């Protein structure tokens, strides 16, 4: 069996991944995670979740963007596709997804489904997307409509379970970098508590230079490692696109991983062909699997 074949973890599997994190795990995460409002007033950024769990070095990253609908899912899927090609067990995680509909008796979100399709380890949806929300709106609004409060602990506990069962995890944020998740917690807080290397997706369009530089500045200000950025072409003919990319490359304190053109269709494999991830921290060497 090749690691490029999907690994499906089910209730019949000996190493079952349960829908709800174990009590001990949840308590352990809770101890290491402060309330967002308190964290801002007290101390330095939290220690890495994976390091706290004693996991060996492995590839993991947090993918954010300059806005919503700018290609985060496409780039996250391309990362997973490339990881699978390296012969490792890779799983995507979209902790919060707003805009889900019923299909085959359960809620589905297109972005979350794309990540599942691109990886080769299938885990319970309650782990890969702990907060699956129906309304296609800002997460804190969609959650309030369903009487749900988005909190850090279930997300961090789910991440630990996924990381323990795989060789690589790609975590995709929701919207831009500072999208509210509840009244005192946003996606920047989540990224800070996960403390993963960050990849920034920049949607190429008018105004993208300021949006990208402000986002990069916010990432660095949180004490996070901005390890790369991707230019994603949103328009078939953007005026001065090359000049915009050059201006960003000169100012963003991280390497350009590639420039994704308008693709038809926009598949993970097609996007990965335009990107180079080999310089990312802990990027795995290719394994020969039979």
Image (cartoon, rainbow, N blue to C red):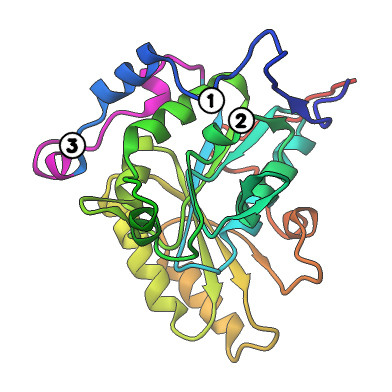
Q: Give residue 232's position: percent from left, percent from top.
A: 61, 69
Residue range highlighted in magenta: 37-56
Residue drawn 39% across the image and 57% down it: 139
**In the rendered image of this protein, does residue 235 appear above or below residue 13?**
below
Picture quarter with the C terminus: top right
Residue at 47 percent of width and 29 percent of height: 158
What residue is drawn where x is 45% and y is 21%?
21
User: Would you say the residues marked 1 and 2 are in contact, meaning their CB atoms lie under 8 Å apart?
Assistant: yes
Task: Examine the rendering and report whether any part of residue 286 can be seen.
Answer: yes
Find disc 1 in the rendering and name its residue: 19
Q: For the N terminus, which image quadrant?
A: top right
* Mark 3 crowd level (few <14, some 14–19, many ≥20, 10 Å Cα): few
Tell me the mark number nearer the camera, choosing from 3 and 1: 1
Name of the residue lying farthest toward the front: 105
- Graded by Cα atoms within 10 Å as few (under 14), some (14 to 19) or many (20 or more), the crowding at tag 2 reads some
| Cα–Cα gap, marks 1 and 2 | 6 Å
Q: Quadrant for residue 192, please give it.
A: top left
Height in image: 131 above or below 48? below
Q: Which residue is mark 3?
A: 44
In the rendered structure, which disc, 1 or 2, sits on the residue that comes first in sequence? 1
Q: Which residue is mark 2?
A: 124
Whether residue 157 appears in magenta in the rendering, the answer is no
Whether pointer 3 and pointer 1 mark residues with C-beta atoms closer than 8 Å, the reply is no
Identify which residue, 16 or 170, lies in the foreground. Answer: 16
Instruction: Return the disc, 3 or 1, that comes first in the chain's sequence.
Output: 1
Q: Position of residue 259 (x, y in %)?
A: 65, 66
Residue 29 at x, y percent in the picture: 33, 23
Element under label 1? loop
């Amino acid at each position: 069996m090749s690691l490029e074949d999907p690994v499906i973890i089910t209730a019949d599997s000996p190493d079952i991944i349960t829908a709800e994190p174990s009590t001990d795990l949840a308590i352990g995460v809770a101890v290491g995670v402060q309330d967002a409002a308190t964290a801002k007033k007290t101390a330095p950024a939290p220690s890495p979740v994976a390091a706290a769990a004693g996991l060996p070095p492995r590839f993991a990253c947090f993918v954010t963007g300059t806005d919503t609908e700018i290609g985060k899912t496409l780039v996250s899927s391309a990362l997973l596709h490339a990881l699978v090609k390296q012969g490792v067990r890779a799983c995507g995680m979209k902790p919060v997804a707003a805009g889900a509909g019923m299909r085959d008796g359960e809620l589905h979100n297109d972005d979350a489904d794309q990540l599942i399709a691109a990886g080769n380890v299938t885990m319970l949806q309650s782990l890969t997307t702990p907060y699956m929300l129906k309304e296609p709106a800002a997460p804190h609004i969609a959650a309030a409509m369903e009487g749900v409060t988005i909190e850090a602990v279930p997300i961090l506990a789910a991440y630990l379970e996924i990381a323990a069962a795989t060789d690589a995890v790609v975590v995709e944020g929701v919207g831009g970098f500072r999208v509210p998740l509840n009244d005192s917690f946003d996606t920047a807080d989540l990224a800070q508590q996960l403390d993963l290397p960050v990849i920034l997706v920049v949607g190429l369009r008018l105004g993208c230079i300021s949006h990208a530089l402000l986002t990069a500045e916010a990432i660095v200000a949180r004490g996070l490692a901005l390890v790369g950025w991707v230019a994603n072409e949103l328009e078939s003919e953007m005026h001065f696109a090359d000049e915009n990319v050059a201006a960003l490359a000169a100012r963003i304190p991280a390497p350009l991983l590639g420039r994704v053109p308008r693709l038809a269709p926009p598949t993970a494999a097609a996007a990965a062909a335009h990107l180079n991830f080999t310089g990312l921290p802990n990027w795995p060497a290719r394994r020969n699997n039979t």
